[in-house]
Structures are given as C-alpha cells and as structure tokens.
C-alpha cells in the first residue's frame, strides 16, 4: 500500500523484492541511548556523510561532534550490512556569553560540512549560531621510539650515560584519532548562522545568517567578504530573511539562498562583488485556493540542496518538497506532498510552534530519489523516476536489523488497517529534521530526537 | 498538542472550512480563527524563551502574519478604536524632521546605542513606555496590538492615558547592530564593541544633562496635570530646554528618558519631595516606575 503522492502509479514489478506493506529498506543500526529521558545536550542537531561516505558526523545541542566510521570489513560481507562505529568524539563548540547584549550564545551545532579529502586527514566545518570552525581529524597509529636523550617513560637520560647514538624508529601503537581545531573563523555574523557551504573550488566557503551571507577563504580567519546583504535601512521594514544557502556543486561562482517568503535566489559572484541583485529568482505563484493565515509561514524555505549533477535544486518548505530545474524559474518541475494531511492542522501547529520546524532534505547519490523527514518519527522517500513514494518509521521497537521496514500511511479519520495511523494520533514531539544520504551507496542516516538511525537498502 | 480549550473535532472542521474556501466559510468561524491567530501571534511575540536570543526568522514570520491580519482588519472597515488620544507632534519629533515615534525611546537612529537598556527592558513581558501619544502615523501593527493589550490589561489603561505600549518586535529590530555599509570586509567584533560602548556613555551623558532641567518643569504643574494631559505638549510648549534637547544626537531616547524621569520625580514633587511616596491611585504604576527607576540607575550608575 503506497502513500498518497501527487501523481500516483502502482508499479510494483519494477522493483524486485517489494511486497505490499514492505519496503526495500531495513534498519541497520541505532546509535544513542534508548531512553525516555533525553538530556537536552544529547539532542542531535546535524547529520552529514563525508564525501566518500566512509565517515558520518553528527552534532548535538551540547556542542559535541561524534564521527562514525564505516567498518571496511563489513562492506564485503554477504549481506553487505554497513557497520558504522564511533571513530572520534570531540567538543566542537562551547557555550559563550555575549556581554554586550547579555545573551547566551548556544553551543548547539547548526551545520556540519565535510571538505573533500586531500590527504590522510579529514577536515570538516562545524558551526553554531555565531562561529564557524575547521576541524582536522587525523589518525595516529605509530609513534617514534628509541630517542637518544629520553627514556621511554619520558625521563631524560643522564648525558654521561650516552655512549652510542641511534636513530629513533616508528613503532605501531593503538590507533588514536585526534581532532584539532585548525581554524576558528572570527565572528562575522550579527544574526544566527543557518547555513555553511563549501565551494567546489575547495578554497572558499560561505556562511549565511538571517540577513547576510559572507564568503570566507578557508585559510584566513580574520576576514570575510560580505556577498549578500538584505538588511533594510529601517529594520521595521524587514519582512524577509535568509533561511538556507548553498554553493553550486560544480560552478564555483554560483550559489543560491532561500528566503522566508518561499523564494530562492541564484546569484553569480562574477556579476558583482555584492550579490544583492539575483541572477535568477525561483518562485512559484501561490495557489489562491489554499490561501490561509499561515501561507507565508509554510512557504518559508527550510532547506535548499543542489542535485549532485548540478542541474536541479530541491527546496523544502513546511508541507512540500519541490524540485526545480535551474533553467526554469517560474515553477518547480516536481512537487511532492510530504504530509499534506497537516494542512488542516496549521492553527494547532502554529500554537505549539511546530510550524516553525525546519526540516532538511537530501538527494540520493544518483539523484534518482529524494528524502525528507516528518513527524511521528516518519520519513518520506520519493522515487523521481518511478514517481512513487513511501513513508517509513524510524523506530527501534518495530523492526530488527536486517528485516524490511513496514510502510505506513496516514489517514484523516480513524485507521482501518494496521499499516495506517490517524492524523490525530501523530506524535509531534518525535520529528525527524536531519537526514543525510550516503553519496554512493544505498545508506541513509537520520536523527530522531537523540538517536541516530542508519538504514540500508536490501540488495537485490 | 492540539488547540487548547477548543474541541478538537470542531476546530478541525472549522479549519477545514476556512482553509478550503475562506470566502464561503461562515463569518463567525473565520473571525474566530483570525482572532485566535492574532492572539497567538501577540503571545509569541511577547513571550521570550529566556536567556538566548530567539530567532529573527521566527519573529519576522510571526510579525508578517500579524500584519496580514491587521491589514485585513483595516480593509474590513471601521477605524480601529484608538485607546489613546493622539495630539499634535509625538514625542520623537524634533527639528521638524520625523523620527520614529514612541518606542519607549528605545528605538534610536544610531543602532546599537541602546542595547543595554533594551536588553533590560526586554526582560519584561510588557514594554511600558511613557511615550505620551500614539499618532496615526505609527506602524499599523502597533495600533491593533495596543487594542489587544488594553483589552487584556485594563488596569494599565486606567492608569494613564498617556502611557503607550509598543511591540517587542520593533524595539528588537531597532537594537540590532549594523556594520558599516561602506566596508564589505567585516570587522564586526571591533565595530560592535565600539558602537556599544560609545553609545552607552553618550546616553548617560545626555541623560545626566537632562536631569538638571527637570525640576524647572515641575514647579508650575500639579500632579493631576501630569497624569491626565499629554506630556509632550507640556514639554514642547512650556519647556525652554526642549530645543536644547533636540540638538543632541540621540534626541528621541533622551527625551523619553526625560519623561521617564519626569513621571518618576513628579511623584516626589507632587508629594512634597519624597521620592519614595506612592501615588494615591494605582500600585501598578508605582511598580513600573520602580522598574524604570532601576533601569535608569543601571544606566546612569547612580
């Protein structure tokens, strides 16, 4: 039984191994404490695969980053289950206090972005509301032994006892993974940073807050260039803010930013130093029949992601996922309803603040599928080619590793089947905001409140 | 999780009706929901999570929702009844040029200058300012917000017709810091620090200079005159130092500080010079005066 989507086709035979109610996906691992009592600091706030997919980074509200590494041996196992184990844990950001404004600056990690790997070490950018940091994660599995002047325990030898000289040699030691902050980029943001994006030139990156976007060089921490500034002269006239921003994956001069009014602007840095004038404006005219008090809030772009090919761009707003062709600004080429049944609940969702939740979205490595999270620990996958979508649940109770996930359907009234759930029974405190897709393999990682779930597609 | 105090099914049907075809829905349902959204929006704007800075995006979205409703209310006709009579020039007008009126004097032209004061004031859920008049030129959002607040907080309305209430949003907008628009290379730490420090010191300087003028204002007027007439007319019609105030850069904020201090000291003068005596009516007024007093003390360091 497939969930409702905007175009509807049943094509079960095209995907072998699919039965009714069962999906191709199965639970691989769950990370984090299985507790009802969740500490605020343990709530996951960022999930990101590295460019090779070998490493998976998560950030939490306590400012910590935990990196998982895929076990190389398990990739070759018959069932091909990918095992991710803890590789490194470190404190990325600490809470700070802005004395001028008498405000706390939260240490919560807002975004993590990996740099493409150039040598044995791994680099990632992590940011909280105010400060971006570049971290180097390196391995040490050898250490020099046989010093002339020092004993093995570090004590210095008496010079008179030295009669011969030897060359120290590297001896193997237990693997130690070190994370060190290589750069701390000076606070250049008055408002909260919502996005960072590494450029394809591998030298620069952008950071975006509510009103400004800054361009940095990775090597220089004391200066950045402002490339977008939408702050009005009179703050009373402010009606629109920047909500998400990303560099084009292939063209180093192109980036996009989404706004709270549902529009996305594409800018070309070659046009001028300050990109306040957009090159393209992607905006879909509003459907007057669905106009409500909350039309603007639900149109606010919560995430924008380029496809790997660089030809398409995906935007997430509160209720839908839209895929845009960069050559066509007037309307998206594909629109997917994530949880349209919430349209009648917007007033309640406004009251409990859920309407402001910022859901992320991600592309499959070959751009054939997209994924995003929803409430009740549901996540949705949309197959663009087959025009089919599925609703799955991230739950460690239902589903043991290796066994297919059951698909769900949300119905407006009371449920009639076991695979259904009524919209009034949804748990809005359990939401999946952060998702990431392995760049090559059929592995997805997503975060519920404090658990990291890793799902894998069953091999054919 | 769902609407408090409203029956789930009924609300769902109403929302369905409203969402699907607003024009066909019964006017009562639509009005009810609009009022709900209006109240929710006001609640959200004025309740703060506490220690950390709430997001700008959220506030902008809520404010836009509010504005949309207010535009509708305006469009539907009937002027929204103003609780406060608006007289000639509002407090902020100096030198004939139009400053933004009456945001408790917290809104200033040089941004970032009143950060400490606004920070202190934002701890209150209500921003009470002693701006005497609410002119029609004020941003539309203020008037409806005042309506809701006056209906909800009748005792403050009774207190003093010259007391104005402003939105948290506008003051927060005002206090945000800008970087120099001419330089695209940002040196934010340094510039923000400097502007903050400079403006705090300039505020205390100008506030101090103003205090010296206040006694001369009060001798000619009784307590009742202050409470029930427009303070701005008193200031600009009768005060010789009004023009000198206009010369200072942070004029609007300085003048409002004057009114703060005026109302504070008038209790003392009206009761024979004892600054601690309470007004014969209204404990709430005294409570807020104490809060403002505290703010002034912190600012001036007295």
Image (cartoon, grey):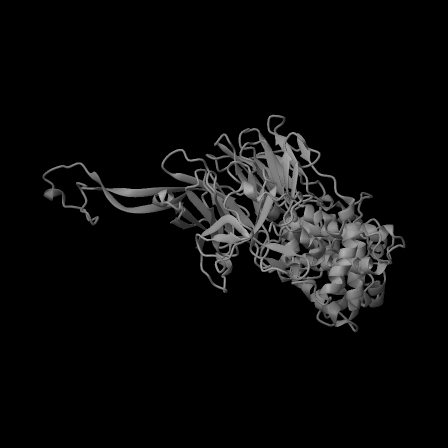
Q: In percent of the image, x 49 and y 52: which residue is there?
A: A404
Q: Which residue is the extreme one toward the top? A: A270
- Of all residues, the one furthest to the right in this rendering is B78
Residue A375, compared with residue A55, is above or below; it is: below
Give x and y (percent) for residue A80.
40, 45
Q: Nearer the viewer, residue A25 or A221?
A: A25
Viewer-closest of A359 and B106: A359
Extreme-front residue of the structure: A13
Measured as percent of width and height from the top left, residue A125 is found at: 48, 41
Q: Is residue A453 visible?
A: yes
Indicate the quadrant containing the N terminus of chain B: top left, top right, bottom left or bottom right.
Answer: bottom right
User: In this picture, is A274 found above or below B24?
Assistant: above
Residue B40 falls left or right of residue A451: right
Q: Quadrant of residue A211?
A: top right
Q: Give residue A353's position: percent from left, percent from top.
A: 65, 57
Q: Is residue B202 visible?
A: no
Quadrant for the C terminus of chain B, please. bottom right
Residue A141 x/y as whole percent: 28, 43
Residue A101 sits above or below residue A386 on the image: below
Q: Quadrant of residue A263?
A: top right
The number of numbered discs placed on residues in the rendered structure image is 0
Of the pair A99 and A3, the residue shown nearer to us: A3
């Amino acid at each position: 039984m497939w969930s409702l989507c905007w175009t509807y086709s049943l094509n079960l035979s095209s995907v072998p191994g699919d039965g009714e109610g069962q999906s191709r996906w199965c639970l691989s691992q769950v990370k984090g404490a299985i507790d009802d009592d969740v500490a605020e600091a343990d709530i996951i706030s960022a999930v990101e695969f590295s460019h090779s997919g070998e490493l998976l980074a998560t950030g939490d509200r306590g400012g910590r980053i935990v990196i998982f590494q895929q076990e190389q041996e398990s990739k070759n196992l018959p069932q091909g289950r990918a095992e991710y184990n803890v590789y490194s844990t470190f404190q990325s950001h600490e809470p700070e206090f802005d004395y001028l404004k008498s405000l706390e600056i939260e240490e919560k990690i807002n975004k993590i972005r990996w740099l493409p790997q150039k040598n044995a070490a791994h680099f990632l950018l992590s940011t909280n509301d105010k400060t971006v940091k570049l971290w180097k994660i390196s391995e040490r599995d050898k250490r020099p032994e046989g010093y002339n002047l020092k004993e093995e325990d570090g004590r210095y030898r008496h010079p008179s006892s030295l009669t011969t000289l030897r060359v120290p040699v590297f001896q193997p030691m237990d693997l130690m993974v070190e994370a060190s902050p290589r750069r701390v980029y000076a606070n250049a943001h008055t408002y909260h940073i919502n996005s960072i994006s590494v450029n394809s030139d591998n030298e620069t990156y952008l950071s975006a807050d509510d009103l400004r976007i800054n361009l940095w060089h990775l090597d220089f921490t004391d200066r950045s260039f402002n490339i977008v500034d939408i702050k009005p002269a009179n703050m009373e006239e402010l009606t629109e803010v920047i909500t998400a921003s990303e560099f084009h994956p292939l063209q180093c001069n192109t980036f996009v930013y989404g706004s709270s009014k549902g529009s996305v602007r594409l800018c070309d840095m070659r046009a001028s130093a300050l990109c306040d004038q957009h090159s393209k404006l992607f905006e879909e005219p509003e459907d007057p029949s669905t106009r409500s008090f909350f039309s603007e809030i639900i149109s606010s772009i919560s995430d924008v992601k380029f496809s790997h090919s660089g030809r398409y761009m995906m935007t997430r707003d509160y209720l839908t996922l839209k895929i845009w062709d960069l050559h066509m600004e007037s309307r998206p080429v594909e629109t997917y309803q994530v949880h349209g049944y919430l349209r009648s609940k917007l007033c309640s969702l406004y009251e409990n603040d859920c309407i402001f939740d910022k859901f992320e979205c991600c592309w499959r490595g070959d751009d054939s599928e997209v994924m995003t999270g929803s409430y009740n620990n549901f996540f949705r996958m949309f197959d663009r080619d087959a025009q089919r979508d599925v609703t799955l649940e991230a739950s460690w109770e239902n589903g043991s590793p290796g066994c297919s996930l059951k698909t769900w359907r949300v119905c407006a009234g009371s449920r009639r089947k076991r695979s259904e759930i009524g919209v009034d029974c949804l748990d809005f405190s359990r939401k999946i905001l952060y998702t990431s897709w392995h760049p090559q393999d059929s592995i997805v990682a997503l975060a519920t409140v404090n658990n990291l779930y890793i799902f894998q597609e069953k091999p054919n | 999780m769902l609407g408090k105090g409203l029956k789930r099914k009924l609300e769902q049907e109403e929302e369905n009706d409203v969402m699907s075809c607003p024009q066909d829905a019964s006017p009562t349902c639509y009005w009810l929901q609009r009022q709900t959204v209006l109240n929710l929006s006001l609640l959200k704007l004025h309740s703060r999570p506490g220690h950390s800075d709430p997001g700008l995006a959220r506030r902008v979205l809520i404010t836009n929702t509010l504005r949309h409703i207010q535009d509708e209310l305006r469009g539907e006709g009937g002027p929204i009844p103003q609780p406060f009579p608006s007289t000639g020039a509002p407090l902020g007008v100096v030198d004939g040029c139009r400053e933004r009126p009456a945001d408790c004097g917290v809104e200033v032209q040089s941004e970032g200058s009143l950060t400490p004061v606004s920070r202190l004031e934002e701890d209150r859920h209500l921003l009470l300012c002693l701006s005497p008049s609410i002119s029609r030129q004020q941003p539309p959002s203020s008037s409806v917000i005042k309506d809701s607040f006056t209906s909800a907080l009748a005792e403050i309305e009774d207190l003093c017709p010259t007391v104005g209430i402003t939105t948290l949003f506008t003051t927060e907008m005002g206090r945000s810091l800008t970087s120099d628009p001419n330089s695209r290379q940002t040196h934010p730490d340094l510039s923000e620090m400097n502007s903050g420090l400079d403006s705090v010191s300039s505020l205390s300087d100008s506030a101090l200079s103003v205090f010296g003028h206040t006694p001369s204002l009060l001798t000619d007027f009784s307590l009742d005159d202050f409470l029930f007439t427009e303070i701005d007319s008193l200031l600009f019609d009768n005060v010789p130092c009004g023009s000198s105030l206009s010369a200072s850069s942070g004029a609007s904020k300085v003048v409002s500080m004057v009114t703060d201090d005026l109302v504070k000291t008038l209790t003392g003068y009206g009761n024979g010079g004892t600054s601690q005596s309470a007004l014969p009516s209204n404990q709430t007024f005294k409570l807020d005066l104490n809060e403002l007093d505290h703010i002034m003390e912190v600012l001036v360091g007295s």
